[in-house]
Image: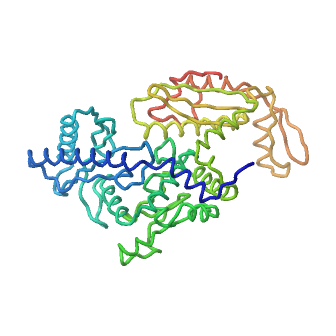
């Protein structure tokens, strides 16, 4: 006998699996408070110009998933402090705090340096920023984060926090959770804003199944914070999904979300509501990928390129730019691309293609103008000699420059193709062609 669960039963079962225990959350809060106390001790010892030390992020707001116990602490400086001084003091505080708690650390970079480390199994970020108020101009991108936290913490109750967790788990299973350059999906902050706007995970899915490109969301809370908001005067964004940041109305929180991932969310919202199943919360994207890979394959090829010593935020856009440029050349030479994607590890960039065929006939047919267009006809005749007429148009037999895809890629690697846009840190001229 097959037991069919209702949506409510499915979501309850999912929540039981993804929600951290009270004991784990208490341990996290205690560890975070221990770090904050240590930071304040260092601040007082050195008389540093710190206004506030704040625990932020999903762990602080109780919207984190099980086994996601990162501790994000922001150290807020007065706006009178110079950026150089903020960076210098911010690093000193972060490094010293982690050292005193017997942790390990390294310095990472965002809009400015911050300290990342590990203390007793918890990953910890200690980030310096300026303290600003709603409506004030930010000095660095991270200045918004404490305001994001203050905006949400006063509005999210326990029920809404659980709804956020359901959304995160759904997106994570679909490979759509994360606003980094590799994922191009939904950030945790965006998830929280969407649940705040719709009131529940299911309400969001019901509306999302009817979204179109350019969907725009303005939270009602914005009108409470900024009394004189003119909707018509708000900044326009040319992006698939627009969610105005209540902290900064000139920012689209959904900006990192790609068009494909926006469309995937619409599609799977519809699919889940049509056929509710717990499977949508259990590595659904990986299962789909496995199904798609269980087939006959075309000709596959990888271009392996030494990686520049730069962060993913730079490398991935440059890989995509190069692959897009190469794809134009491939298509122009009439090879059919079935699939293309790129990825990277610490040492190399990998640009992957799958082609319908790897070899084309040496001969090609070029379509020309109607015979009535004299000037275009003359230009066509100067370019080709093996010309004939069909359906009142000129056609020409010609010879392909590349009848095998490998020859085209050899010219790319050797630098013989000049019409390819080559990024600074991903240069195909240092590449290796690998047949899969």
Q: Is residue 333 left or right of residue 134?
A: right
* Percent position of residue 288, x then y: 66, 41
* Percent position of residue 9, x then y: 60, 56
Q: In the rendered image, which quarter contains the C terminus?
A: top right
Q: Which residue is drawn at 39% across and 52% down?
A: 58
Extreme residue in the front direction: 1
Q: Is residue 70 left or right of residue 365?
A: left
Which of 385/288 is in front? 288
Residue 117: quarter of image: top left
Image position of 55 with respect to 119: above or below: below
* Percent position of residue 159, x then y: 46, 62
Residue 135: quarter of image: bottom left
Q: Which residue is drawn at 61% across and 38% down?
A: 286
Q: Which residue is drawn at 8% across and 45% down?
A: 45
* Percent position of residue 301, x then y: 64, 26
Q: State the scheme by which the image is colored.
A: rainbow
Which of 370/292 is in front? 292
Q: In this view, does 120 lie to the left or right of 304?
A: left
Which of 163/190 is in front? 163
Q: In this view, does 244 lie to the left or right of 277?
A: left
Image position of 200 with respect to 424: above or below: below
Extreme residue in the bottom direction: 228
């Amino acid at each position: 006998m097959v037991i069919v669960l209702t949506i409510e039963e499915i979501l309850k079962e999912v929540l039981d699996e993804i929600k951290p225990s009270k004991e784990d959350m208490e341990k996290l809060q205690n560890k975070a408070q221990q770090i904050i106390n240590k930071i304040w001790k260092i601040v007082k010892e050195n008389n540093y110009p710190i206004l506030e030390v704040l625990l932020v992020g999903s762990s602080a707001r109780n919207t984190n998933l099980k086994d996601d116990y990162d501790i994000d602490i922001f150290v807020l400086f007065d706006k009178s402090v110079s950026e150089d001084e903020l960076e210098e003091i911010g690093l000193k505080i972060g490094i010293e705090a982690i050292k005193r708690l017997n942790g390990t650390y390294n310095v990472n970079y965002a809009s400015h340096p911050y300290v990342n480390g590990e203390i007793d199994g918890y990953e910890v970020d200690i980030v310096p920023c300026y303290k600003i108020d709603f409506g004030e101009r930010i000095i660095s991108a991270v200045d918004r984060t404490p305001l994001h936290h203050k905006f949400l913490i006063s509005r999210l109750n326990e029920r809404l926090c659980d709804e956020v967790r359901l959304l995160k788990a759904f997106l994570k299973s679909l490979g759509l959770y994360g606003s980094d350059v590799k994922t191009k999906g939904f950030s945790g902050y965006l998830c929280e804003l969407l649940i705040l706007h719709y009131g529940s995970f299911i309400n969001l899915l019901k509306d999302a199944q009817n979204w179109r490109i350019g969907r725009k969301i303005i939270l009602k809370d914005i009108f409470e914070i900024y009394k004189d908001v003119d909707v018509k005067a708000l900044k326009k964004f040319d992006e698939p999904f627009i969610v105005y940041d209540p902290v900064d109305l000139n920012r689209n929180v959904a900006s990192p979300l790609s068009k494909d991932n926006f469309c995937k969310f619409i599609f799977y919202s519809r699919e889940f509501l049509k056929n509710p199943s717990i499977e949508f919360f259990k590595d659904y994207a990986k299962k789909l990928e496995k199904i798609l890979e269980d087939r006959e394959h075309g000709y596959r090829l990888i271009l392996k390129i030494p990686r520049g010593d730069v962060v993913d935020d730079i490398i991935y856009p440059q890989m995509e730019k190069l692959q897009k440029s190469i794809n134009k050349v491939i298509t122009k030479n009439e090879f059919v691309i079935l699939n293309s994607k790129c990825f990277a590890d610490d040492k190399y960039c990998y640009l992957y293609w799958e082609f319908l065929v790897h070899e084309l006939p040496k001969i090609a047919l070029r379509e020309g103008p109607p015979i009535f267009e004299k000037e275009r006809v003359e230009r066509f005749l100067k370019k080709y000699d093996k010309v004939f007429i069909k359906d009142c148009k000129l056609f020409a037999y010609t010879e392909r420059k590349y009848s095998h895809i490998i020859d085209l890629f050899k010219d790319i690697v050797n630098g013989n193709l000049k019409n390819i846009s080559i990024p600074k840190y991903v240069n195909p001229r240092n590449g290796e062609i690998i047949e899969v």
